[in-house]
Each structure stands twice: as structure tokens, then as C-alpha cells.
Image (spheres, grey):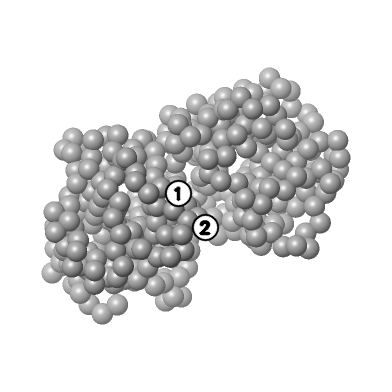
Amino acid sequence: MTKKLDIVFLGLSLSSSWGNGHATTFRGLLKGLHGLGHRVTFLERNVPWYANHRDLRDPEFCALRYYETTAELQRDYAQCLEQADIIVIGSFVPEGRQVIDIVASLCKGQLCFYDIDTPVTLAKLSADDCDYLSSRQIPYFDVYFSFTGGPTLNHLAQDFGARHAEPLYCSVDPERHHPTGDPIRWDLGYLGTYSMDRQTTLNALLLEPARHMPNLRFVVAGSQYPSDIIWPGNVERIEHLPPADHAAFYSRQRYTLNVTRSSMITAGWSPSVRLFEAAACGTPIVSDHWPGLDSFFPASAIHTAAETDEVIDILVGESERARLAMAGRARKLVLASHTGGARAREFVAALTQPRATALDLDIGSAA
């Protein structure tokens, strides 16, 4: 598809990365689309918790607009939506069901959904507890883009009626994530907010190795960890790490640890943006294992571990030459296949399905 497209996104947030991973994902994709010459508008619900923490107010790669209510969205942006070649609605948009019905009734181009939370969405739909998407709306979309690939795509088609389910994974911005040249400060580090379903793995793969190797240095960056966690003395804690500091943080580690949420492990094919960030920064990765990991990183580009002793063996047994070679392979792979530009090309390539009519889809039924 060589035509320059008018693309409108309606997502949780572009302006603020505070407390969500959506903004970073959208920024990389939209920047990539802009680089391909497409015209992009992002419509964001103006909510106080993001308005008070905006770290991107005037993006160069798209027009960023706000609306207060669904009525205002319909009144003020009807022409924008009607004239768009492509409209993409993201997961967790406030009052998403109503937004989808409004947008679907106006859309004359292709209508897409971008699920940045696919396992969560499917669990909510199965429990009839999803306020941003209804099961009846899934067939509205020409393409259902999913953060999770693999068998989940078949599940979306066979059990939920998605007409065309495509993976659209997270990505990395190589202008922000690259080796910084900072001296090594930690032997193993981890970046992530507290999550109960990740803590057992974090204990086994970082805290226990730290207790066994008091001469090595470790770090855990992220908020919301309970006050009763006993941190070994050689584990440094960083409560908050702004996105602008991620590259330096990774560059200061000999190895970095990736720990995956249980829902993502179950679904498989759900890479974290932290994997791509660390690899782009030239930091070797030690990860828990999950289905599909080898489709992103072959064994020659990543370590996997399930037990404390495996991490200890990596930290004390691998030569510096082998460590750097592994990091180099991972970095080369990510820069070739997992940047915002790569995702933008994948997004455009997937836009091949004919637009179903509002009459065919019975748009406007009760939510």
C-alpha cells in the first residue's frame, strides 16, 4: 500500500506515560507511521490523572487532540472521523463501548482495534466484565491488532468472531534506547512495578542469587513493592525510573532480568517492551521462559532460567566475550525487526481487508 493515509487513533493516552504502557507503544508506532509519510491524528480522552502527568504535549509526529465526553467526540470530531482512511481504537479507552459504536457509525474507511492488553481483554469478555469492548463489536473491525500472537489469534477468530486478527507487538525507539557508554554498576538488574504474580520469580532469579553472591551487585527499579519485602544488602532499590533514564539504567548492567506476568505466560507470544529496550541498549537478557519466546529471541540471543542456580551459573560462568556476543546478536535482531518503524510497516501491510458496511454489522445495537 503506497497511498499516503489519513489515520486516526483513539487510545488510552499518548500524552502521558504515567501509570500505563500504552503511551510508549503508541508513540513508537505513530512516529513510525509519520516516518512513512502518513498523516496521523490521536484523539485522547482528557482525564485529570493523565492531564497532571503529561510528558508529551506537542508531538512532532502527529496531531494530538482531546475530548471531554463521548458527546463531544461525536460533535467535534465527526468530520475528522468520516474523512479518515483508517481509524484505530485502542483497548482501555474510557467508555470504549460507546466510543466504538459512535466511531463505527461514522467510519467510511477501515476500522481497526488495537488490543494492547489481549489476555486481559479476553478474560474480561468471557466474564462479561469489559467496559471498553463488547463481544458483539469485535466483528465490526476490519483488523483486530493484538499485542499477543500465537494461538490467541485463532481464539479471537474462532471464538470471538474477529474477521482478521493480526499481531502488532510492542516496539522500541532506537533513538532513545541504545548503549550509552556508562560504566557497569550492577551485575544483574530488573525494571518493573510490583506484581504479585511476578514476585516469586523475581525472588528466585534475583533476590536469591543476591543472597548467595554477596560480592556481586544487584538492582530492582520500580514502584509499589510492599514494605515487608526484605531486600538483601547488595540489592539497590530505585523507586521510580523515568523513561528518559532507561537506556542508562540498562547500559549499567552486566545482565538484565525479564519476568513475565502469569497471564502473558499462559497466552505466550507476548513480549514485553522491556525485552526490546534492553536488547537495543546492548544489555544481555536473562528471562523466564514462555511459549513463543524463541520466535523473538533464539537461544543464541537470550538466556532463560527457571531456578536460582541457573542464574548463578550465568553470572559467574559466562565469559565476557560470550556475554558481549549474545548482547550483540539480540541488539541486531531488535533493530532489524522490532522498532517503531518496523511495526508501522507491519500495520500498513495488514490493511488489506474490505470494509464491511454498518448495515451488515448491525452497528448501533445496545451495548
Between disc 2 and disc 1, the foreground one is: 1
Instruction: Specify the label residue 329 is tagged with.
Output: none
Which of the two residues, 174 or 203, is positioned nearer the viewer here? 174
Residue under pointer 1: 55
Residue 329 picture location, percent across and down: 55, 26
Q: Is residue 104 visible?
A: no
Residue in the picture at 52% in, 57% down: 19
Q: Is residue 74 visible?
A: yes
Compared across the picture, whether 65 is left or right of 362 comes to: right
Residue 257 picture location, percent across and down: 66, 42
Mark-to-mark CA distance, 2 and 1: 12 Å
Residue 308 picture location, percent across and down: 78, 45
At label 1, the amino acid type is: Asp
Residue in the picture at 53% in, 47% down: 272
Which of the two residues, 298 or 282, is positioned nearer the viewer here? 282
Residue under pointer 2: 19
Which callout, 2 or 1, points at the residue further toward the start of the chain? 2
